[in-house]
Image (cartoon, rainbow, N blue to C red):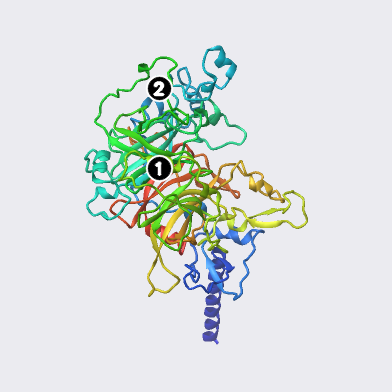
Amino acid sequence: AKCSAKVIRMAGMILGLFVLSHAIFSFSVAVFFLKDTNNEDHLLSNYILEAPTTTATATLESSEDKKPLSSSDNQYITRKYFKYDEAGPRAIPGTARSHGLPNAIPITRITPREQAENKTFHIHQRSNTSHPKSIIELHRPTLRRKGIDESMAGRYNWNHTHETDYRTLYLYNPSILPLHNTLPTFEKDDPDVLSADELQQLTGGDPTVRYVAVFRAYTGCNCFGPNKTDRTLMTAGEQINYLAVALLDEGLDLIAGTDVLIDLNAGPGRLKYFRQGIEDCRISLIKGAIYFLCKEELKQVTIKRKKQHLPKYSVKHHPPGYTPPGYNTNGGIKLPYVYPNINGNGLEVTLLSHCKKIGSGKNFNIFRTKSNSSSSSPIIGDSDSSYDYYLQEHPIPHTYNRLNIPDGTKSSTGTALNNVLKRRPEWLDKQQDIVPQETLPQPTFDTPDTVHSISHCEDGSMNCTQPIDVPFFGENDHGTACCVRVHLPTNNNKSRPKKEVMVGISHQKLSRQSAYWLKDVKKRYEHFGIDQFVSQFVAYEVTHPFHIVARSGWFCLGFANENEFEEGTGSTFAGKNTGARLDIFNDTYNCPMIHFASGFSEVVGNYSRAIIGYGVNDCHPRMFFVDKEEIIRMLTTG
């Protein structure tokens, strides 16, 4: 009897432990019905995702909005759940940089570290400049009274002096160009590298140069987070965009003396200066030439390293009222055109040619792929390359246009590009041979938005009896950065080779223009703040029609750390202003409200890594190395 009692007690303890472990497992795992696909080549369709370690899944289980997806075969698949600040790619330790660029942005135009979190100081700095201003006033009667040609209204004021301009310039949204042929191991048949002469001109023979980086330099910021009712910090004083250019070494550190500041809006362009049509430039190497893609304009440039000396250029060399020919006009400009350096003198940027309007919108990216005869996309000119080049207009749904870029190694004048692309090409209005993708692959892991939806009326009203539920972030993403190459596994078949894909980054934000979350008829999200960002990795096929084969879940990128500040070369904001955090779905995350991944590139000499560069709250830049295995994990198992 005693033996039987012991057995019964032991069995009870085992049963109790089993029930307890089952309860804990149920608490931490979200279980969904997923519809499997019979397409053998569809990536990830048969993945069984492991349970996460986070306990935040309780939110997923308890939400009233949770609606399991239907399934034809009732296959259970466990899915990981992450908070946005837990889900993002992890930087390789010690590789993160937050640049300050001491020559391009001198000490008179930076915010002292002790004032970084003083909003009053920031607002005062917005108008701390000399007169006249950068922009000729728009009030035409005043111009007539002063005897100034009315046609000058809104243009760049050539007499503006930067010598007594103390407005803070906020540096952010970096784009990084790898110079692969700075190493002897580069692919010598790659058409998208600089010639030996142009590489020598760019680096000045410095063997430590590995990258060119460009940054947006702006007189406004969101260091304290966007506010839908108080726009003082973004509207006080003039809103002027500049471009900072610098050379970086293999560790992403600044090559001393190579950082300069130029004004692309005050050069040849299609818009008057006050429109500030050039911002957030991406830098690319295409057919042996360097290009800036800035919103709707594509500019072919050369960058030359200069010996350190005092610049010859000065506004004092020009009489009052002098306006250089071609400044914000459509004629009278002769190419090549050397942009005057506002600050710094270690580089010289020369415009060879430019497309005044390559598309409508912004955040475009250019990607290349091996020439594919099956693609019938209309192109500009005849391609003589083994690669085709595409302008990515939207990442999801994936839309793009095929284009031809003149061979930069054959002409230094850029005449071909200027003649072919100077006006909007007809093909931008035509239907492309984009094969619609009926369904998109499901994100590889779940995040707080998974259980939230927008209930809206088909007629656009806020009063209907049968509203339609759509995912909170939808499937119409904003462009961000593209592309690096990785190899993803296909299904669970280890005997099959991995599949090469192009990976880009897309984003969603709570935009004040669309305010889509306010269209929810249940009015559940009216308390949400504006301009809050989340991002995801998107993997595309490398051949036409470039279908999407995998998507990660949503994530955010983090703040810079205190140790990323270095006197002279680091941002004074590194580790500061961390109060403006992503705040959505009744939770606050350890990441900025705004992170814009403007840079995503390969690493020189190390195919196993990539570089991610982004702006932190439109306040300062950050970039870091990431292992591609980390990207693959996020696109496969989460």
* Residue drawn at the location 60% of the way across and 32% of the way down: 230
Q: Residues within 10 Å of mark 1 (few under 14, many from 20)?
A: many
Q: What count of labels does the image hold?
A: 2
Asked whether residue 574 appears in the rendered view, the answer is no
Percent coordinates x, y for residue 65 in the rendering: 66, 58
Three-letter residue code for mark 1: Leu
Q: Identify which residue, 14 or 561, lies in the foreground.
A: 561
List the single residue furthest toward the bottom.
1
Apparent side of residue 46 relative to residue 528 in the rendered image (left or right): left
Asked whether residue 478 appears in the rendered view, the answer is yes
Placement of the N terminus among the 4 image quadrants? bottom right
Apparent side of residue 229 relative to residue 83 in the rendered image (left or right): right
Tell me, for residue 162, which label it has, or none: 2
Three-letter residue code for mark 2: His
Give above or below for 139 relative to 416.
above
Label 1, label 2: how many angstroms apart (C-alpha)? 33 Å
* Residue drawn at the location 33% of the way across and 23% of the way down: 313
Percent coordinates x, y for residue 246 in the rendering: 33, 37
Q: Could you tell which of marks 1 and 2 lies nearer the N-terminus?
A: 2
Q: Identify which residue, 476 or 620, lies in the foreground.
A: 476
Apparent side of residue 289 relative to residue 458 in the rendered image (left or right): left
Is label 2 in a helix, a strand or a loop?
A: loop
| Label 1 sits on residue | 417
Q: Comparing marks 1 and 2, which lies closer to the viewer?
A: 1
Is label 1 in a helix, a strand or a loop?
A: helix
Give above or below for 559 relative to 171.
below
